[in-house]
Image: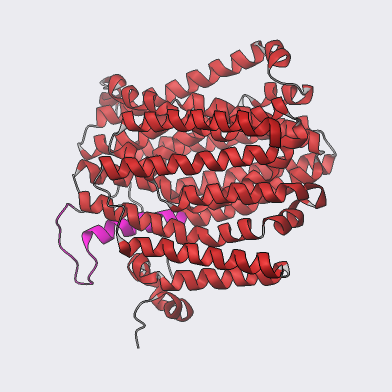
């Protein structure tokens, strides 16, 4: 049996020092660091695929069971809860993945534990305050913000998800720092989706209302938090961070951490403005039916981010350790290797969700959501661009370019609001989709400008740029085929799979597949497909 896993240790993984030599198998130290990242991230990708299947089932069952109006109200309340989660985080999830690896590299356990206690306590405090504010000002929300009474009632219930989701993101960062992809795999990608699926099935089988579904989401969130807390206790104990002397002499780096995280709250604000806040504008200017048309296909378009989201968890801690060692070559190599793996592995999802958006939407959500096809295509384009250009914003954070990050966050946030106010009243859900995608594209272009001007990341290496040229050519080919011939969905899907395999094969040498996964040499079919040199 071929083992694609990695051996996990109780401490953060060792990264070879800059300038170390190659092993006898020809694998350099820089390759090994990238390999550790790619392999660990692939474990998370497998978990992400499992969670996608479960969450996709939840999405389809929910949309088909609820009326358009009820689903729109539920999606609205869920979006507000996401806004609350971003506020509760206060950018501290980013601080955790940057500072804790650096403190660990320096052997400063007092600051490590102090950061853990301070950030988690802050998130819980802000989250509880939000719950009291929303429930206490229910009448104000109903009078000035929320038009639909069902959406308002669901909001009062589901606002409790805000601190739960915030802590969920914090826990992911913690387990990524200590190279524990299995913990993220189980809690994030298995347990959480299963609990949501159970809640939906209970509602459908009992014929219950949308309010029961909201309560089911809350119960699932609580159970997930209990699982994470248990794993966190074990993690801290394994790393000897629960020693009495260490707890009594905590060093809480309040100024250092908050001077970094507070400005980066703007990144979360931008995320809110280009996603959740768009839902708020849509409900305010139109109806919950329009909200449903957009919100139904958002998760499908979001599939374009699956690979990126799986790779980002381990990227920031590893990049931070390389930054601490001033390994510029290692950072550049890590950035590009990650970017092209994300771009190539995300391509099949983009091709289907963009070129086949209309028939795919009808197939999944029935004819009553046919108008959402064009919305899916627009959102898929923006999301794939966001994923394919690489983890540029995360790299800027590792370099500590806080001023620049804040500047482009504010600029793109204002653009998102301007696009929304201009397009949503006139074009409804389609206008909202255009606003989201346009903001994503401009935001990433600005991030790339920051990488070019303020870091050592080389953005103009033909070895990597030709990968993107092949992706553009493949996407254009598939789009022209579907637009001109209008073939059956099955034929288009098969052609998409074939083009994706060809794309992977022609870029296999640049991706260094055999370095990242030498186990593939043991599998005859994959060895022939993926290896640059087939052994006799």
User: Is residue 179 placed above or below 521 in the rendered structure?
Assistant: above
Does 143 sit left or right of 204 as displayed? left
User: Is residue 249 placed above or below 509 in the rendered structure?
Assistant: above
Percent coordinates x, y for residue 459 in the rendering:
31, 52
**Which residue occupies 79% across, 33% down?**
70
Residue 109 is one of the magenta-drawn residues: no
Percent coordinates x, y for residue 488 in the rendering:
73, 69
**Which residue occupies 43% across, 81% down?**
528
Give, as a single range, the part of the protein colored magenta. 17-43
**Residue 4 visible, this angle:** no
Percent coordinates x, y for residue 510 in the rendering:
34, 67
Percent coordinates x, y for residue 310 in the rendering:
47, 50
User: Is residue 188 placed above or below 528 in the rendered structure?
Assistant: above
- Which residue appears farthest toward the bottom when viewing the image? 536
**Residue 437 visible, this angle:** yes
**Which residue occupies 73% across, 22% down?**
152
Q: Quadrant of the C terminus?
A: bottom left
* Nearer the observer, 333 or 78: 333
**Which residue occupies 42% across, 74% down?**
530
Residue 22 is one of the magenta-drawn residues: yes
Report which quarter residue 479 is drawn in. bottom right
Does 508 sit left or right of 318 as displayed? right
Does 408 sit left or right of 128 as displayed? left
Q: Please, which colouring scheme is shown?
A: secondary structure
């Amino acid at each position: 049996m071929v083992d694609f896993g990695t051996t996990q240790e109780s401490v953060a993984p060792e990264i070879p020092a800059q300038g170390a030599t190659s092993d006898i198998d020809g694998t350099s130290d820089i390759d090994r660091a990238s390999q550790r990242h790619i392999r660990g991230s692939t474990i998370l990708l497998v978990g992400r695929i499992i969670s996608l299947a479960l969450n996709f089932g939840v999405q389809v069952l929910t949309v088909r069971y609820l009326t358009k109006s009820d689903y729109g109200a539920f999606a609205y309340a869920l979006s507000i809860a996401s806004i609350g989660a971003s506020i509760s985080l206060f950018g501290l999830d980013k601080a955790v993945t940057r500072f804790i690896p650096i403190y660990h590299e320096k052997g400063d356990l007092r600051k490590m534990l102090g950061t853990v206690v301070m950030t988690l306590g802050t998130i819980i405090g802000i989250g509880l305050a939000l719950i009291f504010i929303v429930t206490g000002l229910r009448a104000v929300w109903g009078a000035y913000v929320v038009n639909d009474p069902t959406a308002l009632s669901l909001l009062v219930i589901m606002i409790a998800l805000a601190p739960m989701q915030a802590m969920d993101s914090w826990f992911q960062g913690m387990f990524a720092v200590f190279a524990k992809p299995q913990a993220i795999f189980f809690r994030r990608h298995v347990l959480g989706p299963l609990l949501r699926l159970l809640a939906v099935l209970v509602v459908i089988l009992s014929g219950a209302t949308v309010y029961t579904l909201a309560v089911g989401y809350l119960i699932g969130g609580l159970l997930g938090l209990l699982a994470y807390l248990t794993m966190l206790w074990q993690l801290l104990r394994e790393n000897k961070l629960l020693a009495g002397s260490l707890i009594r002499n905590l060093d809480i780096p309040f100024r250092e951490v908050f001077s970094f995280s507070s400005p980066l709250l703007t990144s979360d604000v931008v995320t809110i403005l280009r996603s959740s806040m768009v839902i708020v504008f849509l409900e305010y200017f139109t109806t919950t039916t329009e909200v449903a048309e957009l919100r139904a296909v958002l998760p499908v378009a979001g599939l374009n981010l699956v690979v990126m989201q799986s790779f980002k968890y381990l990227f920031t801690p590893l990049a931070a350790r390389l930054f601490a060692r001033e390994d510029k070559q290692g950072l550049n190599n890590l950035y590009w290797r990650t970017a092209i793996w994300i771009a190539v592995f995300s391509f099949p999802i983009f091709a289907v969700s963009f070129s086949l958006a209309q028939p795919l939407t009808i197939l999944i959500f029935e004819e009553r959501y046919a108008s959402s096809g064009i919305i899916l295509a627009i959102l898929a384009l923006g999301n794939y661009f966001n994923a394919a250009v690489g983890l540029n914003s995360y790299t800027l954070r590792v370099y500590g370019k806080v001023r620049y990050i804040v500047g482009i966050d504010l600029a793109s946030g204002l653009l998102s609001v301007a696009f929304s106010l201009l397009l949503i009243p006139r074009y409804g859900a389609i206008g909202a989709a255009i606003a989201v995608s346009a903001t994503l594209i401009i935001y990433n272009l600005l991030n790339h400008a920051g990488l070019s001007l303020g870091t050592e990341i080389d953005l103009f290496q033909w070895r990597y740029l030709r990968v993107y040229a092949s992706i553009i050519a493949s996407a254009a080919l598939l789009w022209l085929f579907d637009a001109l011939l209008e073939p059956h969905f099955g034929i288009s899907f098969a052609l998409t799979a074939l083009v994706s395999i060809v794309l992977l094969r022609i870029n296999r040498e640049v991706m260094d597949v055999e370095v990242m996964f030498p186990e593939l040499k043991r599998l005859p079919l994959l060895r022939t497909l993926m290896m640059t040199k087939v052994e006799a």
